[in-house]
């Protein structure tokens, strides 16, 4: 349950990003979360909504995009999606694979009016 | 409506603090382990056994992370190792900023080995870099042998896996081979130790490995 502290980190970055933009009203914070980032989107929504209540950010929403886990196999050079956390190449069963996406956790942009 | 590009990592403050810690640890020739497990796996008992065998030969310090109490720090202090307790007051993990504060309170003169005992939790601590050299996940035989499949994030970020309480294997339904197969599915690069911190069985291999890491 570290989503509360993650929501605090998000709000800190949002405030910094809005500082030079006087007079705008925040509508949406677009966040990307990798499937392996160990972040629960529902909990992050709840935490964000609770923290912005009665603040100038009230009324804004998180828009969360989930990034699937993909990897490349260094043995057969194939790229593939990973499911069930089995870090083996589905093509040649090699464990010499490199994860390409799925660890992300970042704020992409802010939609303001 | 308009769009303001941000493109910033949400954990950037933690990652920056961790990078600074890592640089400082390296400059001090300090080998740092982040110990991760569920509550009750025997992290503190393993630390006690390790301190008993490794110090004073190798000067070792400990940072203890707990939600409440300094019970663990008191256990460690008996071994005359420098120790700082972080009480997170409900926080489910340690972050690099907390560790930075704790490190500043530790007398690190001559210390070559630092253990950071994280809050007992197999979920949240996986996401936080503490500037350590290696992450060690500890599992005890009284937990299920499917733990790696239930908590894959933790096993994926770990470098080392210690299976503790092997003395209880005759009494529990824990299959070591199944456990290792499950763990290797999630992370084929895991380095395993099987030991009992209570009886000392298998601890020697762990101590030898620690000494090698410090020398290299």
Image: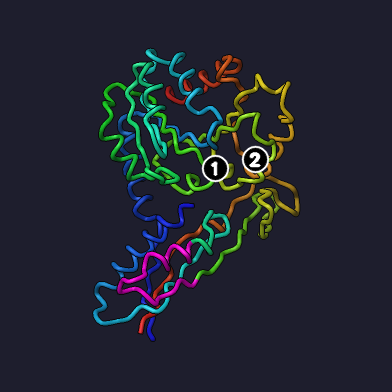
Image position, residue B79 (x, y; %): 38, 16
Image position, residue B70 (x, y; %): 37, 30
Using residue A108 as the reference point, say whether residue A87 is left or right of it.
right
Q: Residues within 10 Å of mark 1 (few under 14, many from 20)?
A: many
Using residue A85 as the reference point, say whether residue B84 is left or right of it.
left
Q: Nearer the viewer, residue A66 or B117?
A: B117
Q: Earlier in the sequence, mark 2 or mark 1?
A: 1
The residue pinned by badge 2 equals B147
What subunit carries mark 1? B
The verdict on a common chain for dots 2 and 1 is yes
Q: Nearer the viewer, residue B36 or B87?
A: B87
Based on the displayed image, in which of its 4 quarters is residue B188 positioned?
Answer: top right
Disc 2 and disc 1 in contact, CB within 8 angstroms: yes
Secondary element at image label 1? loop
Image position, residue B27 (x, y; %): 31, 33
> What residue is shown at x 59% (from left), y 20% (from top)?
B196
Q: Which mark is residue B122?
A: 1
Q: Is residue B55 above or below residue B187?
A: above
Based on the displayed image, in which of its 4 quarters is residue B179 positioned?
Answer: top right
> What residue is shown at x 60% (from left), y 62% (from top)?
A68
Q: Which residues are magenta?
A: A44-63
Secondary element at image label 2? helix
Q: CA distance from mark 2 to mark 1?
A: 9 Å
Q: Is residue B171 above or below residue A21?
A: above
What subunit carries mark 2? B
Based on the displayed image, in which of its 4 quarters is residue B183 positioned?
Answer: top right
**Residue B76 covered by magenta stretch:** no
Q: Is residue A31 above or below residue B51?
A: below
> What residue is shown at x 67% (from left), y 22% (from top)?
B168
Q: Which mark is residue A2?
A: none
């Amino acid at each position: 349950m570290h989503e509360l502290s993650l929501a605090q980190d998000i709000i800190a970055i949002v405030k910094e990003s809005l500082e030079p933009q006087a007079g705008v009203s925040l509508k949406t914070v677009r966040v990307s979360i990798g499937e392996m980032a160990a972040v629960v989107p529902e909990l992050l929504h709840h935490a964000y909504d609770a923290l912005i209540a009665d603040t100038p950010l009230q009324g804004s929403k998180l828009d969360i995009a989930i990034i699937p886990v993909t990897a490349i196999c260094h043995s057969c050079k194939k790229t593939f999606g990973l499911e069930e956390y089995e870090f083996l190449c589905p093509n040649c069963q090699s464990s010499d694979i490199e994860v390409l996406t799925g660890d992300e956790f970042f704020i992409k942009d802010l939609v303001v009016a | 409506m308009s769009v303001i590009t941000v493109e910033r990592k949400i954990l950037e403050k933690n990652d920056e603090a961790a990078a600074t810690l890592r640089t400082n640890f390296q400059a001090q020739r300090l080998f740092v382990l982040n110990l991760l497990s569920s509550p009750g796996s025997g992290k503190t008992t393993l630390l006690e056994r390790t301190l008993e065998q490794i110090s004073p030969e190798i000067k070792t310090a400990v940072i203890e992370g707990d939600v409440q109490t300094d019970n663990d720090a008191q256990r460690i202090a008996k071994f005359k190792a420098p120790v700082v307790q972080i009480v997170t007051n409900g926080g489910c993990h340690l972050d690099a900023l907390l560790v930075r504060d704790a490190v500043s309170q530790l007398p690190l003169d001559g210390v070559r080995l630092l253990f950071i005992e994280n809050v007992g939790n197999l979920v949240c601590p996986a996401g936080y870099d503490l500037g350590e050299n290696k992450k060690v996940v500890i599992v005890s035989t009284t937990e299920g042998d499917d733990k790696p499949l239930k908590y894959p994030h933790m096993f994926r970020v770990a470098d080392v896996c210690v299976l503790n309480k092997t003395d209880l294997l005759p009494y529990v339904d824990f299959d070591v081979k199944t456990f290792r197969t499950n763990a290797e599915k999630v992370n084929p690069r895991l380095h395993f130790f099987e030991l009992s911190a209570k009886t000392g069985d298998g601890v020697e291999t762990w101590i030898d490995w620690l000494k090698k890491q410090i020398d290299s």
